Amino acid sequence: MAKSASVDVQKSNWEGSIPIAISLASTSLSSPTIPPSLHRIISRQSYLHIALEDEVRMFHEFAPVTCFRSVTQKDVTSNENGEENDKGDNAIDEAKDKQQGNASNLNDEMAKKEAVSDGKTPYPVCWFEDEETGLPLRWHIFVGVLHDMFCIKQQEPSMHRLPWKIRIHFTSYPATLLPVISSHQKSKDTDVIRCIFQYYLNSLKQSLYVQYNSGKVAKNMTKQSHLQLWDGIVRNQYEVYRSIASDLDGNITVGGNSNAEISCTCSSIPLRILVDARPAFSRPCRLDAKDSEEIITLGNVLQECLPDLFPTAGDSGILAEENSVGKTPRYLIQGIQVPLESHILDIW
């Protein structure tokens, strides 16, 4: 695919949106007046807390005052330890202390930015639930991926009704099912947006390490670059995001020891796969095929990562029409079931 065409496809994907209807859970209602459901169209490339901030604050006015507090402080420590484990790739291990310092500085930078530009009260701690299934929604996953996960469970795509109905809760946070929203280390105030930003930052670092097989690219990114990427997501502005993201594709020259420059070559595509309600897992997809004439397709990748769901028919190497349980698995990328013969590089 030509680069210009690829950029056009990426921009079209970025502009994808989902209609939702959000309502307040009865267990979080303290007012005699029940607020009506709100209908919104939100970006697939955002997070629920960010895309629905105004709605969250509006519904919070009808919720008990006592639910404005940190989530089970006894769980915060274990969550932070869990985040450290999630970071456990070689990129972060190479310079753990330095990266922790950078993350702290970025958090402080965000706090200053919010203090100047935003006179709002702190973001209320809340969680979201899929109204049809009653399952909590993993707030640290992009909206589009969350929607696809629930849509794909339906036997037929047409059975999934829109708008997507979501229920918001301000009480009984399911800390055993969702990541705990912890307090800021310095202010001790619960900061939802900063917590989401930290999850995004960790994911970005892990992806860059897989992509370049080195932690140097992530370590050499500036604070401004991190904040600009995040700003593009928060404001849903593709050009702002792309101005930084485009520099992370291909070969990059970074500073090494003694100020010497080191060239980092893009060697793999970082993949993150979610199957049903299981935790997501990441895998590198090599860019160079074993055979110079071989094209790595989406089917090849799914066959390698999920052999039970995408088996081959005998020794032919061709994907079978049904898996071991007699079903044809469904999969979605940006809400689309892309043909299995599609070149993985074109999809990326």
Image: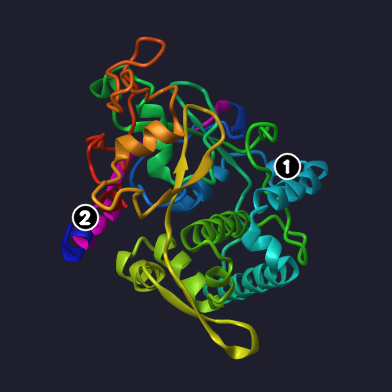
* Rendered residue at 36%/68% (across/down): 250
Q: How many marks?
A: 2
Residue beneath disc 2 = 9
Q: Residues within 10 Å of mark 1 (few under 14, many from 20)?
A: few
Tell me the amino acid under the disc marked 2.
Answer: Val
Q: The magenta stretch spans which residues?
A: 7-26
> Image check: 243 left or right of 82?
left
| Residue 319 falls within the magenta-colored stretch | no
Q: Observer-nearest residue: 241 or 206?
A: 206
Q: Quadrant of residue 41?
A: top left
Name the one closer to the observer, 274 or 73. Answer: 274
- Taking the spot 30% from the left edge, 55% from the top edge, the residue there is 14
Taking the image as shown, residue 301 lies to the left or right of residue 191, namely left
Under mark 1, the amino acid is Thr
Q: Which mark is residue 120?
A: none
Picture disc at residue 66: 1
Q: How much space separates mark 1 and mark 2, taking CA atoms?
A: 46 Å
Q: Position of residue 222 (x, y in %)?
A: 54, 78
